[in-house]
Image (tube, rainbow, N blue to C red):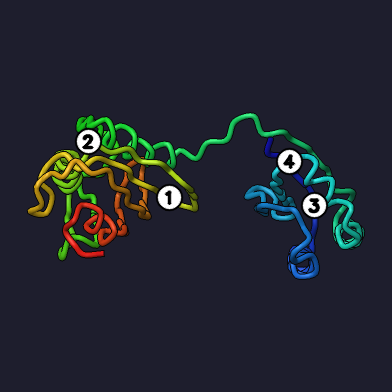
Amino acid sequence: MTFVQIVDYETTQPEAVNDLLDRYVEQTQGRRTVLASRLAQDRESKTHFVDVVEFESYEAAMKNSQLPETDRMFQEMVALCEGMPKFTNLDVVRDEHLNTLLVNRMFDDIAMKGDMSVVDEIFAADYHDHDISNPVDKIGRGAIHEDTTMWRAAFDFTFTRDAQMAQDDYVTTLWTMTGTHKGEFMGIAPTGKTCTMTGTTVFRCEDGMIKEGWWHYDAMRLMKEIGAMQP
C-alpha cells in the first residue's frame, strides 16, 4: 500500500530549505526510497509550506528515515523553521489520476469494445492526431472513428497496458496488442494468423478531454507476422 507523509512547516528561509533538500537528494542517490516529493507554498501565508512525500509503503518510509543523511537533513531543517515541523502519516486508500481514467476508456471502450459513442465523450472536437502510419496529421474526432474502424475491421484484438505514467496533462501508455488477422489490411487478405504489435501512445488532456495524441508502434513486426514482408 502506498504511503504518504505530509510535512507541514513555517519558514522565513525557503531558499535555504530548498538548498538543503537539493543536497539531501544528491547525498542519498541510490539509497533513498522516496518515490516522489511535492513542495507547496500557502497562497494565503507565504511562510507556510507543505511537503508531500510519497513512498511505496510504510516500511519503505521507515527504511528511508534510518538513513543518516535523513536525520541530519531533519536537524538542519528544524533550525531553518519557525517551530517544529508537523508530520502526518497516511496510508493511501484510493489513488486515481483522472486523465488516466479518461485515456483508458480509449483502449477499453473504443478500441476493444468498439463503442464509438465514447469518442464524443472523451475526445475534443479539435483533437489533433499524430500517427507514424499517417503521412499527414489528422484533426478532429473523425480521426479516431476512421482509424479505429479500420483496425477493428482487420483484427480481432486486445490491448494489454504494460506500463502507464501520468504527468501534468500527459498520459503515456506502453501497450501490447494481440489479435487475429480477420479482414483485409493494407491490401493483405485475411490470413487468420495471430499477431502481436507493441507500441506507445501519449495523450495530452485539456479540460477533461483528450486534446492531442501521438501513436508510435512496431508496424513492421505486424506486417512480417501477416506475411506482408519477409522476415
Amino acid carrying mark 4 in the image: Ser
Instruction: Give how far across and how far down residue 141 sits, in percent.
Output: 18, 44
Cβ atoms at labels 3 and 1 below 8 Å apart: no
Please, is residue 180 above or below residue 126 in the view?
above
Q: Which mark is residue 120?
A: 2
Q: Could you say which quadrant of the image residue 22 lies in?
A: bottom right
Tag 1 secondary structure: strand
The answer to whether residue 201 shows anywhere in this view is: no
Amino acid carrying mark 3 in the image: Glu
User: Mark 4 sits on what residue?
Assistant: 57
User: Mark 3 sits on what residue?
Assistant: 10
In the picture, the quarter occupied by the N terminus is: top right
First-in-chain label (4 vs 3): 3
Q: Nearer the viewer, mark 2 or mark 1?
A: 1
Query: Going by the image, does 120 lie left or right of 64?
Result: left
User: Mark 1 sits on what residue?
Assistant: 171
Cβ atoms at labels 4 and 1 below 8 Å apart: no
Distance of label 4 from label 1 (alpha carbons): 24 Å
Picture residue at 78% right of the left edge, 39% below the top: 58
In the picture, the quarter occupied by the C terminus is: bottom left
Q: Nearer the viewer, mark 2 or mark 3?
A: 2
Distance of label 2 from label 1 (alpha carbons): 19 Å
Q: Residues within 10 Å of mark 2 (few under 14, many from 20)?
A: some
Amino acid carrying mark 1 in the image: Val
Instruction: Give how far across and how far down residue 88 sits, in percent.
Output: 79, 38
Picture residue at 31% right of the left edge, 59% below the top: 218
Picture residue at 32% right of the left edge, 52% below the top: 197
First-in-chain label (2 vs 4): 4
Tag 2 secondary structure: helix
Distance of label 2 from label 4 (alpha carbons): 39 Å
Distance of label 2 from label 3 (alpha carbons): 47 Å
